[in-house]
Image (tube, rainbow, N blue to C red):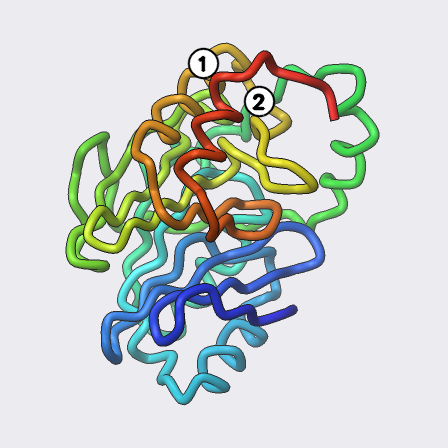
């Protein structure tokens, strides 16, 4: 796992072999957006300590959606440190293991990438302490706004920190090679509409589930990518 500074003293990316999570800091209080794969908790704790921070101050883990590379370590971390696990109401039953993960509708070119993604360890059933809806505000980042962004999965969310100009887009948007619509969607048209909605927030920094964060001209790049005719990579 790599630890990458995005905003000094505020935001860090935790990059795993597949996917990534983000650590947000409010003083000594910490929030994790997504949690990496199952078994990643010790690496995450080590990364937190390497910053001179205490994993016991991990107040919450916000899950953008139900896939294993995003929720895998959440149960372990929450059990160790008492963190609250947050997810959208529609995603919570899947994360808890009460419903199956919805199957994506794959384009032909997505098939080999999907086979690779399926090598991520299966996530254990994970508790969800707080089910959220569109527009709710979470107590970190001076007010973190939940943005329902369905399409990748029915309960996918983005998290917008308007006071800091930061957007966590989950897998609705990808930044691998180019900024584009995320892959493996259950409803591609709905996902494209969510992409446009997230882009309209015009963040200064955009953080993706896959690919490097966008820190330069983010608003313009997102707008152009969300309104362009979708193209194959």
Image quadrant containing the N terminus: bottom right
- Check the image and report above or below for 27 versus 101: below
Is residue 46 depicted above or below 147 in this figure? Answer: below
Q: Nearer the viewer, residue 179 or 61?
A: 179
Q: Residue at x 62, y 21 (%)?
A: 104
Q: Quadrant of residue 196?
A: top left
Q: How many marks?
A: 2
Whether residues under marks 2 and 1 lie with C-beta atoms below 8 angstroms apart, the answer is yes
Q: Position of residue 98 (x, y in %)?
A: 44, 34
Image: 31 above or below 224 = below
Q: Nearer the viewer, residue 119 or 123?
A: 119
Give residue 93's position: percent from left, percent from top.
39, 34
Q: Which quarter of the figure is the C terminus placed in?
A: top right
Secondary element at image label 2: loop
User: Can you name the residue that lies furthest to the bottom here?
Assistant: 52
Residue at x 57%, y 71% (from the top left corner): 3
61 on left or right of 151: left
Residue shown at the point (43%, 40%) measured from the top left: 169
Question: Which residue position is annotated with label 2?
Answer: 185
Counting from the top left corner in percent of width and height, residue 207 is at: 46, 48
Disc 1 crowd rating (10 Å Cα; few below 14, some 14-19, many 20+) is some
Say if 54 sits above or below 59 in the image. below
> Mark 2, residues whose alpha carbon is within 10 Å: few (<14), some, or many (≥20)?
many
Label 1: which residue?
190
Gap in angstroms between the C-alphas marked 2 and 1? 9 Å
Residue at x 51%, y 45% (from the top left corner): 208
């Amino acid at each position: 796992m790599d630890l990458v500074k995005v905003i000094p003293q505020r935001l860090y990316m935790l990059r795993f072999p597949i996917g990534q999570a983000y650590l947000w800091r409010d003083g000594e209080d910490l929030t994790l957006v997504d949690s990496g794969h199952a078994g990643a908790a010790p690496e995450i704790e080590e990364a937190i300590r390497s910053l001179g921070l205490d994993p016991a101050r991990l107040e919450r883990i916000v899950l953008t959606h139900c896939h294993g590379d995003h929720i895998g370590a959440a149960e372990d971390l929450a059990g160790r440190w008492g963190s609250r696990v947050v997810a959208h109401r529609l995603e919570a039953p899947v994360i808890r293991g009460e419903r199956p993960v919805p199957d994506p509708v794959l384009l032909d070119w997505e098939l080999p990438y999907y086979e690779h993604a399926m090598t991520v360890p299966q996530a254990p059933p994970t508790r969800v302490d707080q089910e959220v809806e569109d527009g709710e505000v979470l107590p970190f980042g001076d007010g973190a706004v939940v943005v329902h962004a369905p399409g990748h999965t029915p309960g996918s969310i983005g998290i917008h920190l308007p006071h800091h100009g930061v957007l966590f887009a989950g897998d609705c948007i990808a930044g691998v090679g180019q900024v584009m619509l995320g892959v493996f969607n259950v409803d591609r048209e709905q996902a494209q509409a969510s992409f446009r909605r997230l882009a309209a927030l015009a963040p200064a920094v955009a953080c993706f589930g896959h690919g490097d964060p966008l820190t330069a001209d983010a608003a313009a790049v997102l707008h152009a990518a969300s309104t362009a005719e979708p193209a194959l990579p």
